[in-house]
Image (cartoon, rainbow, N blue to C red):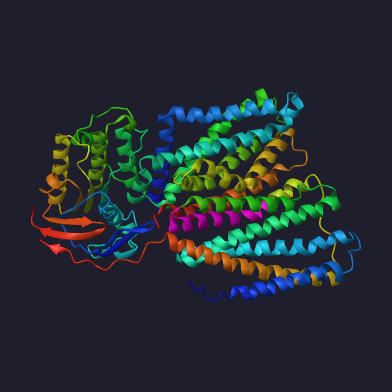
Amino acid sequence: MKLPFAWEHLIGVIALLLFCYGQVFGLFMVPPDAHMGDVARILFVHVPSAWNAFFVFTIAFVCALGYLISGRKGFDHALEAALEVGILLTILLLMTGSIFAKPTWDVWWKWEPRLTSSAIMLMTYVGVVVLRSVVQDNERRAVWSSAATILASVTLPLTYFSVQIWRSIHQIQTSPADIDAPLRMAWRINALAVLLLATWFLARRWRIAARRWELGDAPPLPEPLQPEEV
Amino acid sequence: MIAFFQQIFGVALKDLTIEVRAPVRAFSVLFFALVILVMVAFAAGSTTKILQDIAGGTLWIAILLTSTRALDQSLSTEFEDHALEELLLWPVEPAAIFYGKAIANALVLWVVAALLTPLLFVIYDAPLFGSFVELVALIALGCAAIAAPGTLYATLTAQARGGAVLLPLLLFPLVVPALVAAARGTTVVMEGDPMRQAPAWLVVLVLFNLIHWAVAGVLFRYVIEEP
Amino acid sequence: MQDLARRFGGRWAVARVDLAVPRGGACMVTGANGSGKTTLLRCCATALKPHHGQITFGGVDLWRRRALVRPTIALLSHATRLYEDLSAQENLATWARLGGVSADLSDLLARVGLPVGRQDPVRTFSAGMRRRLALARVLLKEPELLLLDEPFTALDPEGRALVLQAVGALRQRGTTVLVATHVPGEAAALCEQRVHMEAGRVVRISEGSA
């Protein structure tokens, strides 16, 4: 079987090269942070993955709306891709956040509003993916997961808000120290690299979703049959 | 429009009649909630201080866990003999079906909460230094906040294989804002609320209810029409 | 219906069916189990969306105008679609309230041969009693298009006569009837048109009562 040329691999190669450059840049070419030293370098991965996780989940939300309004199956493939790539990025976000928390706050986990909301965001979307996995019928899966994604997405701002009130009562919210202007460059390179990586993953995952839809779909309609009249 | 409200009323009345006619179901839900209260007390320790501190949170954990049972029952009634399809074809507006069922589910949770809260004062020795009205408002809004998304999700999971496990998985992360607001609000009201935090929690609950009663009402149409 | 098709998962349950039933006419759909009879009826009842083609009734596309046509269609389906924990009267009262119709429910129950004033839930009913109750609900609706899916299963001879009589009365008033059955015997008297389905397709159409 001859596979069609996949344009996304081009983006993937660029993404990987840029990502490598971003790591080298962030690790060796940027001076250590004035307050936190070398530890702050993990933020060059942490912050871009946060931005991209939110961006990808926004795509999922738009696709869910798009599917319910238009019923086009392309939106469902994109939704499936976006949910899983978003979950991947959120896991990356939480892991790097946890690694950063250990030396700076001396704990692996802190019930800090941003961290907590991200964890809840992860759980919410994992629930949607599990829902997708138990539904057999293509259209039904698409409608159900779109509805669940929309409900999950509209709740997230409130989740962040409520977690913030919940914590702010006991402690002042901690925010990472201001990053010097030259360091922003490392963020930008990495953010772009992660964005391109996410695009590559999204496109690959989109194709798998499209294949699965086809497998569950009915064969083309047979020719019309002229019934015999009696 | 009047017909729409009549349909909401008709669906809610039907659900509540079923609860009354099948008291075993309602009792099992109530007893489940009661068992949770007692079990948490055993697990958390025996000093009165600890129990008093966790009383508000335990109440909401009990309500949340109980809600999945109540919601699952409410929706399996519809699918047991495919009555939901007849409702749709009768025809009852999908939004009317949703609001009718969600209101009935909220009422069931209110009854559960109304019976559990006095018990909290008895077996957890919970104090009540704050405003009673605020406590009632928190409980009413908190139950409604669970009922709206819960009714939508139970409609999905009651049709899926292994749905009973799936419902908490979907519902719990979603209602975190409502749970935080209701549980923290209840706790501060019990402790007397010197810093006036309860109004902020009530605002969170009102916002959550507004969003979910509106959005879930719209989405319900999509999930019950056969694609 | 024109070129109707509906898929379930990976197969076409109904594949390209063309069928015309005259207004006020009655048509019997026969075929083995799994030949697509029920799916055909459920599409007509707007319970399922046709994936291809369309069904029109009185010039109206059923699926597209489903909010409009649903009050005029009744489906007596295989599942009786009742509330198990309510009594017969409570079931009917619920449906009457939701439909905004006022009817003498006791009379209706008596007409389908069910005891009046009993409080026992439908859960305790036999299959035949449930079907009688479902029939009473159809009578409550007085449809213009009546879809019967295996209307005679689980019914005693008296019950079958009841169904025949009720359908006959509705036909007098101009109701169009579609009956799906794999035992054509009793329904044959009702219907002047007959189609036979195999594997989701209509293979034979015969006019005149058989």
Magenta stretch: includes residue A151: yes
As rendered, which of B16 and A184 lies closer to the eye?
Answer: A184
**Where does the image place residue C31, in percent across and percent down from the top left?**
20, 52
- Nearest the viewer among A122 and C13 is C13
Is C97 placed above or below A12 here? above
Q: Quadrant of residue C3?
A: bottom left
Most distant residue in the right direction: A34
Q: Quadrant of residue A153?
A: bottom right
User: Residue B200 location in percent, x, y?
Assistant: 70, 47
Give the main secondary structure of the magenta stretch. helix
- Is B115 within the magenta? no
- If the image is split into quadrants, where does the N terminus of chain C sit? bottom left
Q: Is residue C104 visible?
A: no
Among the 4 quarters of the image, the one containing residue C15: bottom left
Indicate whether A111 appears above or below B20.
below
Q: Nearer the viewer, residue A106 or A181?
A: A106
Q: Residue furthest front?
A: A1
Where's residue C100, x and y in %? 32, 46
- Name which residue lies at 70% across and 42% down: B198
Magenta highlight range: A136-160
Residue C201 visible in the current orientation = yes
